[in-house]
DNA sequence: AAAGATACATATAAATCTTATGCATTTGAA
DNA sequence: TTCAAATGCATAAGATTTATATGTATCTTT
């Protein structure tokens, strides 16, 4: 189910980006949006997502807000100022990494 | 030194690609070429590279040829037919992954 | 009534990489 | 000429990150 092991190192980047665009989301909602936007090509597992969200909270990148919908709990996450900065950093880092990879993977036979 | 933790999952892809372009390389040579081509933005550590090369050999993706240069040993690696196929697979996989990530990271405020 | 979706969470295992070493030869600079 | 840096291989231990497997509970739909 886990799409690709290339996700490693990009989970937080994805989460931060979605929060920056949506303003406020809860865990399950994030998994569904990623599934939808990527047409099932990227599946976030709960076992990876929740620990990542908790880590972001511990880092001060997000703050939470607990809401009850009926009797069921829902934990909304939103970016702090720190989180917005981190998001930009991470997105740039990923973009740079892809550029660097292109230098290698776009080589034509006989460097 | 390790440039970025985004390398995770792409080390073998890079190695296979360089071997496909150069035909035949040894470990140290690979680290130096990557350093040069990426202007130090990507540094392959030996602790990661050698195990990866050994794994590729065990998978039948590469074959080795040991040569002595003076008294010093040198192990050349080159792609097998399997390795060429694997290279293409991995490069495509990476390209697809980047496209998928773009769907998420290029979102404009308010999806 | 039961299955499937919603919603949270954690523990264990697996994978991958970094850091730290270790050994030996060769080259270049002081 | 001597000593550091570069060349060249390799492995072990630790860190990080993710997947898999569970567990609990509510809500919706058939």
Image (cartoon, coloured by chain):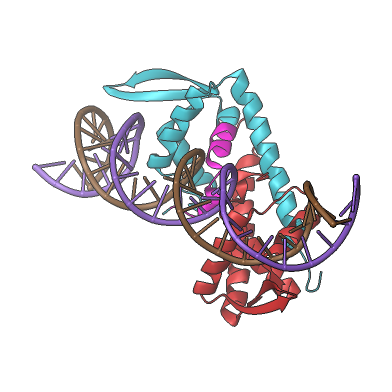
Chain colours: A cyan, B red, C purple, D brown
Q: Is residue B38 above or below residue B30?
A: above
Foreground: C12 or A61? C12
Residue B45 sits inside the magenta stretch: no
The residue that appears at 69% across and 70% down in the rendered structure is B26
Which corner quadrant holds the N terminus of chain A?
Answer: bottom left
Count numbered badges in the picture.
Answer: 0
Q: Where are the magenta residues, as a range?
A: A2-18
The residue that appears at 70% across and 51% down in the rendered structure is B43
Which corner quadrant holds the C terminus of chain A?
Answer: bottom right
Foreground: B19 or C19? C19
For residue B1, side relative to residue A61 (left or right): right
Residue A17 sits inside the magenta stretch: yes
The residue that appears at 79% across and 70% down in the rendered structure is A108
The residue that appears at 55% across and 29% down in the rendered structure is A19
Q: Position of residue A14 (x, y in %)?
A: 56, 39
Whether residue B92 appears in this view of the structure is no
Q: Position of residue C27 (x, y in %)?
A: 85, 63
Foreground: B13 or C18? C18
Q: Main secondary structure of the magenta part?
A: helix
Q: Quadrant of residue A45?
A: top left
Q: Position of residue B44 (x, y in %)?
A: 66, 54
């Amino acid at each position: 189910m886990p799409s690709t092991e290339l996700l490693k190192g990009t989970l937080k980047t994805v989460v931060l980006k979605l929060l920056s665009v949506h303003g406020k989301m809860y865990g399950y909602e994030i998994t569904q949006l990623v599934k939808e936007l990527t047409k099932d090509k990227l599946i976030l597992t709960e076992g990876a997502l929740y620990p990542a969200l908790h880590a972001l909270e511990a880092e001060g990148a997000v703050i939470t807000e607990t809401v009850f919908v009926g009797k069921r709990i829902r934990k909304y996450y939103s970016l702090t100022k720190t989180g917005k900065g981190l998001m930009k950093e991470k997105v740039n880092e990923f973009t740079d990494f892809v550029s660097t990879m292109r230098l290698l993977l776009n080589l034509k036979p006989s460097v």
